[in-house]
Amino acid sequence: MSLKAKKTLAVSQDFGNLEHVQSASQICLPTRWITAEMRNHDVFAIFDGDEQIQILPVVQDGEVVGLINRERFMGTMAGRFHWEIYSKKRCTKMMDHDPLVVDAATSIAEVANQLLHLGEHQALPESFIIADKGTFQGTGYTSDVLATLLRQQQAAVAELQTHRDTLSATVRERTYDLELAKLAAEHANQAKSEFLANMSHELRTPLHAVLAMAGMGSQKSGEAPREKLAKYFSVINESAERLARLVSNLLDISAFEAGSIVLNPTLIDLNHLPARVFAELASLADQGSVALHFTPGAPAPYLGDAERLHQVIRNVVGNALKYSPKGSDILIQLETIPPEPDGGYCLHIVDHGPGIPVSELEHIFARFTQSTQTNTGAGGSGLGLPICREIMRLHGGQIVASNHPEGGACFTISFPPVRVGR
Ligand SMILES: Nc1ncnc2c1ncn2[C@@H]1O[C@H](COP(=O)(O)OP(=O)(O)O)[C@@H](O)[C@H]1O
Ligand SMILES: [Mg+2]
């Protein structure tokens, strides 16, 4: 076996995972040893009989006194001349008298240290003796020490790299989170500014109207004709109602935000909702010459909060009225979703107003938002639809906007199937 092959054999010994090798004892290979009395021809016979044996420790009284290296020994013994001289001599003549002996408990790093400092100009020995408190244990190979150190260093570098990768991923994540938080804070700040601007406008307009009409009314109460005074009162009434609606919408929004809205469900017939809203908005519709159409159908039993659902339909029909041209009509249809009676219901509210730009169909459900088609400064808090959506969400239903093929907006309110009580 060649020297190279032997080294390969030494490193490939199964010492387990080299990363976990701590001390010399873990790379110790049991080795055949000989006594100091042995003659060279016997040593020759041992080497000759087993090519695997590379070194033979020489032991006297249990202690290693030297080391015979196969290559050097066989080289010296190769010539007949040498053979005759040396064969009968004691093996101690041929041994290295000062081999490196390390204690089994010595750490691998320390063994490497000792190997490197054997002699400044001396080549690294191939092997060394491992003893346990002076008693021979076996042989250690320098290649195993180096392989162990190398593997441990590789593991440390890999661990460092993983740590560095994790660290940079964490930093990236944190930076991203901070960016998000910053964006959210900026967004919140902008929303707050928009809210204040909207609210001051929404509050000031009706308040000014109330103050102006009340002022004029009291100044002219003695002289103004009754119709004029009635007009002042009606403006005051309308403005106060607008203010009351705004305040109640604001209260609703903050209650939804706090999650404190609780539904009060009762069994209702959905056919009754449009009729009640129409009755309330009849005079407004008359003023704009807008006709409201709804034909009640078969009973549509539904378990829901009658007041909250009324609020939804009132807001949607109120919006439709606001944007409907004179002389047009608003149609409400109640549809039963098959299979009856388990499919639920849909209420469609269709007008002939300007409709809603397609890209804003969803956006109008955000708070304080008006469509670019209608934000003409005519007023509106932009709170109605977000409240409608919250109410429908609490019912397990939904509200969406679309445009009617013949023009105008179409709002569809879906009521999920009634399960309670069935
Ligand atoms: N029927 C409709 N036709 C056209 N635009 C509508 C209609 N209904 C709602 N919108 C748009 O949606 C916006 C939001 O409505 P809403 O939340 O009820 O607030 P507000 O009525 O206070 O403006 C309205 O300002 C308007 O731009
Ligand atoms: Mg509205």
Image: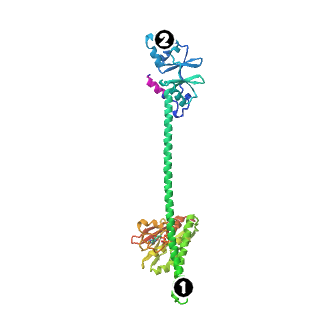
Judged from this view, the residue extending furthest toward the left is 406
Q: Is residue 301 left or right of residue 328?
A: right
**8 drawn magenta:** yes
* Residue 79 seen anywhere in this rendered image of the structure: yes
Horizontal and vertical percent position of residue 416: 51, 65
Circle 1 crowding by C-alpha within 10 Å: few under 14, some 14–19, many from 20: some
Q: Element under label 2?
A: helix
Circle 2 crowding by C-alpha within 10 Å: few under 14, some 14–19, many from 20: some
Query: Ligand 1: does it lie within 8 Å of the C-beta at label 2?
Result: no
Does the residue at mark 1 contact the one at mark 2 (Cβ under 8 Å)? no
Query: Ligand 1: does it lie within 8 Å of the C-beta at label 1?
Result: no
Provide the residue span drawn in magenta: 2-10
**133 drawn magenta:** no
Q: Element under label 1?
A: helix
Question: Residue 401's quadrant in the figure?
Answer: bottom left
Question: Residue 262's quadrant in the figure?
Answer: bottom right
- Note whether 151 is above or below 342 in the view shown: above
Question: In this view of the protein, which residue sits in the foreground, 346 or 182?
Answer: 182
* Amino acid type assigned to the residue bearing label 1 in the image: Gly
The prevailing secondary structure element of the residues shown in magenta is: helix
Give how far apart the Cα atoms at labels 1 and 2 are.
140 Å
Horizontal and vertical percent position of residue 28: 54, 26
Looking at marks 1 and 2 on the same chain, the residue that comes earlier in the sequence is marked by: 2
Horizontal and vertical percent position of residue 42: 51, 13
* Amino acid type assigned to the residue bearing label 2 in the image: Tyr
Residue, disc 2: 86
The residue sitting at 55% across, 15% down in the picture is 36
Image color mode: rainbow
| Disc assigned to residue 74 | none
Q: Is residue 258 left or right of residue 76?
A: right
Residue, disc 1: 217
Question: In this view of the protein, which residue sits in the foreground, 112 or 1?
Answer: 112
